[in-house]
Image (tube, rainbow, N blue to C red):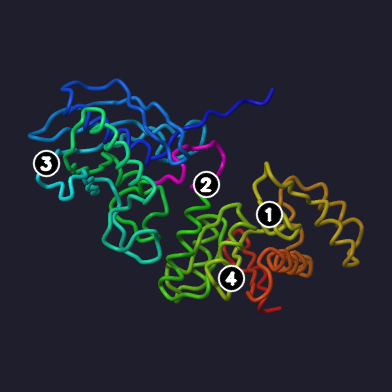
């Protein structure tokens, strides 16, 4: 029986819950066990409050981010809100104003191209709306019309951020407070594709019309070694999102793309797999064997390829003795990418060996 994966909630939802809990703590003098938060979808969710305390004239409340069954470095992170109620006279036109800032552990934006300008705390527009609505609900429930200052903080935010790509995007000092709906759906990959889009946006905002798309840290490190003269913003990790990353790059207006990958991913791309994860596209060494046969290589080579357990084993078998077969894979990668990207964009493919040397480069054949 297929296991039902548990949904979770975003850092933005967690921050909104902490902010609402802090307002209620100030108005009621007690820590709420949980608070109801409106999601960006219009649905609601109950979030437990982890802690509340008073400090001077402010309240500090925290909640725990729960990513459900989605793999997420922020799962279990404590996210807090330091809230102060301002004088009613400061409300201006009579409507309460919610002023949101970022404290310790919340990243600050230093590069253009993201949803917010440089200098702003990395609290995205969606979570800001959720925080403001959550605070407004708490005030309305007690018929209070006062402006509210909300500082979001994450106690281990700087440590968690080191496990993310925030620094590449120009987000320094902590994590981002994110969420497009408020809910984390397991394996939906929304966060990863959002990171790809952000990386491409930053590159374009830096004036770049060329991006190097790698599938992970190791292939990216080899690509940076191959092109040390290019700015760091040129390099964008796209994971297994072959088709999606190309579509995003086209939307952002790139003229040139370089796919810098290892042989296993290259075979999947060569077969036209839109997503290259093992659970989504079968690594078919049989296809590689068929291409070998089409090139006129001995049948024994095709049999040997089919008997390999991994792409790495197959690569060792053909890399030196049959470079034309590696080149066939590379040409097919370019063709698949061109189909996903459409006309008007120049595609280059580099396939690395497992020591970081270029075993194939479509611009040198």
Quick check: 98 left or right of 316? left
C-alpha separation, residue under disc 1 versus residue under disc 3: 55 Å
Packing grade of label 4 (10 A; few <14, some 14-19, many >=20) is: many
Which of labels 1 and 3 is toward the front? 3
Packing grade of label 2 (10 A; few <14, some 14-19, many >=20) is: some
Quick check: 306 left or right of 270? right
Which of labels 4 and 3 is toward the front? 3
C-alpha separation, residue under disc 4 versus residue under disc 3: 55 Å
Boundaries of the magenta span:
178-191
Quick check: 78 left or right of 304? left
Which of labels 2 and 4 is toward the front? 2
Viewer-closest of 129 and 225? 129
Task: Look at the numbered discs 2 and 1 and tell me whether their residues touch, using CB distance below 8 Å.
Answer: no
Of mark 3 and mark 2, the one earlier in the sequence is 3
Which residue is painted at 41% across and 50% down in the image?
164
Task: Provide the residue designation for mark 4.
Answer: 257
Task: Provide the residue designation for mark 3.
Answer: 88
Task: Provide the residue designation for mark 2.
Answer: 190
Q: Position of residue 301 (x, y in %)?
A: 86, 57
Judged from the image, the secondary structure of the residue bearing numbered disc 3 is: helix
Which of labels 2 and 1 is toward the front? 2
- Within the image, what quadrant is residue 96 found in? top left
Task: Provide the residue designation for mark 1.
Answer: 274
């Amino acid at each position: 029986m297929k296991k039902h994966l548990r949904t979770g909630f975003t850092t933005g939802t967690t921050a909104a819950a902490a902010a609402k809990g802090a307002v209620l703590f100030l108005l009621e003098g007690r820590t709420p066990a949980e608070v109801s938060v409106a999601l960006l979808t219009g649905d609601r969710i109950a979030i437990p409050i982890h802690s509340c305390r008073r400090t001077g004239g402010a309240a500090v409340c925290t909640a725990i981010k729960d990513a459900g069954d989605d793999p997420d470095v922020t799962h279990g992170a404590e996210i807090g809100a330091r809230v102060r109620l301002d004088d009613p006279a400061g409300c201006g036109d009579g409507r309460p104003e919610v002023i949101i800032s970022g404290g310790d552990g919340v990243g600050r934006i230093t590069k253009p191209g993201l949803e917010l300008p440089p200098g702003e705390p990395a609290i995205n527009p969606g979570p800001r709306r959720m925080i403001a609505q959550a605070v407004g609900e708490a005030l309305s429930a007690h018929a209070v019309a006062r402006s509210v200052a909300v500082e979001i903080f994450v106690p281990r935010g700087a440590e968690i951020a080191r496990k993310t790509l925030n620094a590449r995007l120009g987000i320094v000092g902590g994590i981002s407070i994110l969420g497009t709906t408020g809910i984390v759906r397991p394996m939906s990959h929304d966060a990863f594709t959002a990171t790809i889009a952000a990386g491409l946006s930053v590159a374009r905002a830096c004036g770049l019309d060329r991006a190097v798309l790698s599938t992970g840290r190791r292939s990216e490190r080899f690509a940076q070694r191959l092109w040390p003269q290019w700015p760091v913003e040129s390099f964008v990790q796209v994971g297994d999102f072959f088709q999606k990353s190309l579509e995003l790059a086209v939307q952002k207006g790139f003229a040139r793309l370089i796919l810098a990958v290892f042989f296993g991913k290259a075979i999947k791309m060569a077969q036209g797999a839109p997503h290259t994860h093992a659970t989504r596209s079968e690594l078919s060494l049989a296809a590689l064997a068929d291409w070998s046969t089409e090139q006129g290589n001995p049948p024994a080579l095709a049999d040997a390829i089919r008997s390999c357990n991994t792409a790495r084993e197959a690569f060792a078998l053909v890399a030196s003795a049959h470079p034309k077969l590696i080149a066939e894979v590379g040409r097919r990668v370019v063709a698949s990418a061109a189909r996903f990207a459409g006309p008007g964009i120049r595609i280059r493919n580099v396939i690395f060996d497992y020591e970081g040397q270029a075993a194939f480069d479509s611009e040198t054949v």
